[in-house]
Image: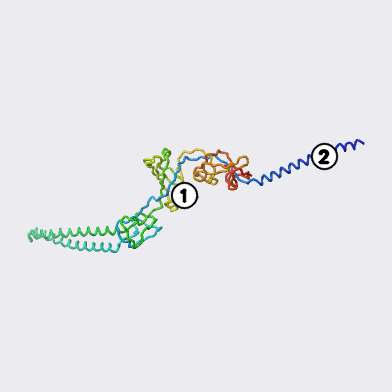
Amino acid sequence: MNSFKLSVYAGIPVLVIVGAATWHQAQKKSELDRQQVVKNEASVPVTVATVAERPFRTSIPFTGSLLAVNRAELRAEVSGRVTRVTLHEGDPVQAGALLSAQDEDDLLLSVQSAEAQLAQAQTQADQASRDNDRAQALLAKHSVTRQAAQQAETAYDVYMTTVRTAQSNLGLAKSRLKKSRITAPFSGQVAQRLIQPGELLSAGQQAFTVLDNRRLEIQADLPTESLALARVGMKASFRVTGFSHPFEATLTQISPAVQADGRTLRVRLEVPNADNTLKSGLFAEGELLATQETSKPALPAAMVTAVGGQAEVFRVVDGVARRLKVAVGPDQGGWRPLDGLAAGTQIIAQGRDLVSDGTRLRIIGPAAGTEGK
């Protein structure tokens, strides 16, 4: 066997070994690629948001109901049958406007009768006054006796007493008429109408509720620990169900004493509402904002769904979703502070409804609006 054949035979095993190694490498790469595809298909694509340090003003949480500053429950002053009702619930009303009347015709006749009696008495008194003046002038000239002059003066006094009695009767008749009429004490709206024409209304019975929603207030009870922070003039931010944006209020009054339980402090917050957007009776939940600021971990408010001051979030840990409950503070400037998360922690933003604890994740980028935050 010559050297050429020997070389060929010797090289065949080498080629076999190299070929086998190359084939195994290709197979291994193919398997890794296949596993990566399987892994990607088994994971959930999500975007993430990074917890960031943000400045927040010290806050005092509160809850309460919105109440109209001007609110009145109107009750009947006298008993009587309702003869007229002028407005319905929801109708606007001006200060002094008539809402209802009782026994109106009878009372008007009483006033007219008293006016006629007063007019008659006044006419008689005027004539008696002239007669008295004439008698006193004649007495000075010794043209009448003193007795006649005294009789004229006595007659004048009697008629003046009759006038005063008639004036009193007219005043009583007008007072009864006025008390039988229920009028609006201020401009606003009729919130409740509780009577109908023909109904017998008793003295003290409620007939209407009138309120003015243009100025609202919130009466809230704060924990006594907040006494050192609460100051008249502090601004507050609050939310009500049905509105996506917060509203503002101003602390206008702090009770000089704590409540009987010794644990709460009653405060009053005034809410401007010139456009009547808010309504009396709505439940409000918010916070008083102090002037000093502290830095806290936070996320954009749109990425946090809080219930009762707590929220459930999913951290990204080694490519896996991990469920976590955290305490959440109120929205300030579009951000909400978080207790229980450190700055730099990655939280699932878009896609969080598709994952559960332990779900493998495929991060496809930062959440919209959080780049560079």
Q: CA distance from mark 1 to mark 2?
A: 79 Å
Res. 49 in view: no
Residue 91 is situated, as x and y percent measured from the top left of the image, at 40, 58
Mark 2 secondary-structure assignment: helix
Q: Identify the residue at the far top of this view.
A: 3
The amino acid at mark 2 is Val
Q: Which residue is mark 2?
A: 16
In the image, which disc is placed on residue 166? none
**Earlier along the polypeptide chain: callout 1 or callout 2?**
2
The answer to whether residue 176 shows anywhere in this view is yes
Near-viewer residue (137 or 343): 343
- Vertical comparison of 103 with 285: above or below: below
Name the residue rendered at 80%, 40% in the picture: 20
Q: Quadrant of the N terminus?
A: top right
Q: Is residue 282 left or right of residue 75?
A: right
Q: Position of residue 345 (x, y in %)?
A: 58, 39
Q: Seen in the image, is 9 located left or right of residue 299?
A: right
Decide which of 160, 212 is in the foreground and name it: 212
Q: How does the figure colour the protein chain or chains?
A: rainbow
How far across and how far down the image is residue 128, in percent? 15, 61
Q: Residues within 10 Å of mark 1 (few under 14, many from 20)?
A: some
Circle 1 residue: 240
Q: Residue at x 62, y 40 (%)?
A: 318
Front one among 125 and 351: 351
- Which quarter of the rendering shows the C terminus? top right
What is the quadrant of residue 83 in the picture? Answer: bottom left
Furthest-right residue in this view: 1
